[in-house]
Image (cartoon, coloured by chain):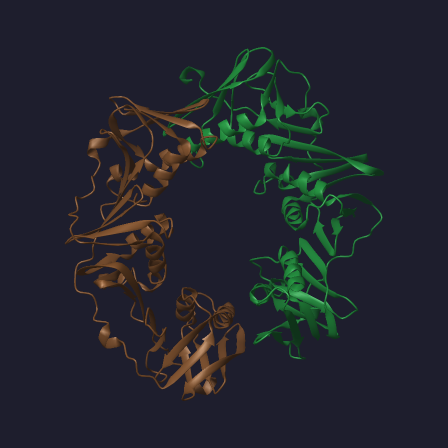
Chain colours: A brown, B green
């Protein structure tokens, strides 16, 4: 095999497929990136058996073939090659000895037989949706924080992707909170309901350019999901099982509704967390009166008090939260003001907009009212 | 005590003195920053007993006094306060309860008696030199990498500062290499020779703005050194003892002189180190011929070969180096081309300019010529 690339093209391709190369594995071949130039295209592949990424790279095929190269070494060598427009030549012989040549430097490394590499599964392309790269990237970032990757319930390690006519609903939950985002699609599609591993979504969101003009096609098969965009294909296993029935946890009743400036509220809570060290479970106590909201946090390091102006309808309430949960939700909500709906200090609180394009459910925490 | 600051001023002051706050100490009072407003100025102090930093901060003294506040907490609270121009009020009572107030937030933390804090030693100001902040910052960065902070010989943890008439010579060495920089001073000063702890120099170089127009005064006493610049004083103990006699290790004889483009040479060596993992001692072998220099590195990961154009006078030579030592020196040398002087594969090599404003001595390493 003999190939020639522009440095930029190969580095970019490697960065994409690296996201699927496992850092630890018992199958050492998976620590490699497959370079496949056996047809008229050059394709790079990384695969950790759960998640596989394949991307097409521009380059000249001087001699067809395929080779698997240690991902870390291959990535570092190409990244460190001098100028951005440098041309890089990769050549391997029958014994998989590989030479990477660029300007005045020549690297020799031992490659492995490309045939040993695990190919990506084939996915039927009949059931799909289409949305912009920007929207997909955004909807992942707006929900990914409330998965629970280490929970014994493996469904909490994933997100629900539910397609209903022209709407995609994405849901994640971790037992203390639920994040829901709804996206309007340009077309009507077949109804679908799958659970996508959080790791897959997090890697996809990193690769996506976030361009509003460019699209992603998402294909659903029984056991897999395929994301197709630009020159790249990301294939992942789905999580098996039936997702939690969240509709029964949602309620539109409330006793108190508060409208508050999002940035001020977020800044205040973030400041309060200065007094908390990791694993230190101190609640943020919110005391809601007529036109103002008082925030309090006490810890062994000291205390913080803050007051914010609000618009309130309904009853006064004093309620406690894990400040991290509020911060996570507030950080991903756009817009100047937010609405918070509360029933009582024991019932879930909802942060949502009127159209319910987003709903963040957060369970309150107990606090000792006597010490407040 | 009651003080009022602009957020920027107090944050900046804290950042400076934090450099002297120890992360681990048995004297918990040293984990604090002292705020002293007992006179007409507000001064912050951090002190780890080896190194002490005091800086003056602009602010209003509404009530005189002093207090010691936990450095980490104080730093985080002020940094997270909203806008850059926010005004911050710090108030403490007789029991050292301290309130930090800014906009809508109030923090209460427990301070400690400022009298418990360890003041900086008093330094006689008769022996000194003056140079620009830029030059001092630069000369530290150009030599600090070749100290050996963990060596049993404690002099290797410091740098020699030697003043001779209108010249400052700075020397560091670690048993494998020596770095020497000479700086011309604007005035003639009393001769001095002290060993300054590397940690002190490294913190000073971080605080220095690097402004060519602004000056630093360095005062020398028997056991201490004092750096005075802007609103800041850095006091450090000196390392006791007589520094190594380096003059006998320097030689101007050579058999081979090579002139090479610095950037090309550095790029090549940096690339070669891709094939080396930490603690993996593989030499870079340099084979010098008439107009070209061949670089080779072999490791368990593969091999690299590169060729560079050079100007050579004298004999051909094949010589091996720890690539890290070459990289460290080349990174801090300005200018397009460098000159390398070699005697034989066992003798130190010198990278220096004609005026010897810098000299980097590097010992070569043995290699098995048969495997090259």
- Residue lying furthest front: A187
As drawn, is B22 to the left or to the right of A313?
right
As drawn, is B18 to the left or to the right of A138?
right
Where B150 falls versus A320 (above or below)? Answer: above
Confirm whether residue B34 shows in the render: yes
Residue at 64%, 76% (x, y): give it: B96
Which of the two residues, B240 or A289, is positioned nearer the viewer here?
A289
Residue at 77%, 46% (x, y): give it: B215
Quarter of the rendering containing residue A87: top left
Count of labels in the image: 0
Q: Look at the image and tell me in which quarter the N terminus of chain A lies.
A: top left
As drawn, is B64 to the left or to the right of A229?
right
Residue at 64%, 71% (x, y): give it: B88
Q: Position of residue A292 (x, y in %)?
A: 50, 83
Quarter of the rendering containing residue A43: top left
Q: Position of residue B100 (x, y in %)?
A: 61, 73
As drawn, is B189 to the left or to the right of B299?
right
- Residue lying furthest bottom: A315
Where A78 falls versus A304 (above or below)? Answer: above
Q: Position of residue A305 (x, y in %)?
A: 53, 78
Which of the two residues, A64 or B332, is positioned nearer the viewer here?
A64
Quarter of the rendering containing residue A65: top left
Residue at 76%, 45% (x, y): give it: B213
Where A148 falls versus A86 (above or below)? Answer: below
Confirm whether residue A294 shows in the render: no
Which of the two residues, A167 or A290, is positioned nearer the viewer here?
A167
Q: Position of residue B61 (x, y in %)?
A: 74, 72
């Amino acid at each position: 095999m003999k190939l020639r690339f522009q440095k930029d093209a190969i580095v970019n391709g490697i960065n994409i497929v690296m996201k699927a190369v496992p850092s630890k594995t018992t199958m050492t071949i998976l620590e490699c990136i497959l370079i496949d130039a056996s047809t008229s295209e050059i394709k790079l592949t990384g695969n950790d058996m759960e998640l596989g990424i394949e991307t097409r790279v521009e380059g000249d095929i001087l001699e067809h073939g395929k080779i698997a190269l240690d991902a870390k070494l291959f990535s570092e060598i190409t990244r460190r090659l001098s100028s951005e427009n440098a041309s890089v030549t990769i050549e391997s012989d029958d014994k998989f000895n590989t030479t990477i040549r660029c300007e005045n430097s020549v690297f020799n490394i031992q490659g492995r037989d490309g045939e040993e590499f695990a190919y990506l599964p084939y996915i039927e392309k009949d059931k799909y949706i289409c949305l912009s790269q920007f929207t997909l990237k955004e909807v992942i970032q707006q929900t990914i924080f409330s998965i629970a990757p280490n929970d014994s319930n493996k469904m909490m390690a994933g997100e629900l992707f539910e397609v209903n006519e022209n709407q995609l609903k994405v849901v994640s939950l971790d037992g203390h909170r639920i994040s829901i985002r709804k996206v309007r699609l340009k077309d009507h599609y077949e109804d679908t309901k799958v659970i996508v591993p959080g790791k897959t979504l997090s890697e996809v969101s990193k690769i996506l350019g976030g361009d509003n003009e460019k699209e992603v096609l998402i294909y659903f098969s029984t056991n897999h999901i395929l994301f197709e965009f630009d020159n790249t294909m990301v294939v992942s296993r789905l999580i098996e099982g039936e997702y939690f029935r969240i509709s029964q946890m949602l309620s539109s009743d409330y006793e108190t509704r508060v409208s508050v400036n999002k940035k001020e509220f977020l800044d205040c809570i973030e400041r309060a967390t200065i007094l908390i060290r990791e694993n230190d479970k101190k609640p943020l106590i919110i005391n809601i009166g007529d036109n103002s909201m008082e925030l309090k946090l006490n810890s062994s390091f000291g205390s913080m008090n803050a007051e914010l102006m609000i618009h309130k309808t309904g009853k006064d309430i004093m309620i406690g939260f894990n400040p991290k949960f509020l911060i996570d939700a507030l950080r991903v909500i756009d817009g100047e003001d937010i609405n918070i709906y509360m029933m009582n200090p024991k019932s879930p609180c909802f942060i949502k907009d009127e159209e319910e394009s987003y709903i963040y459910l957060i369970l309150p925490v107990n606090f000792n009212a006597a010490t407040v």
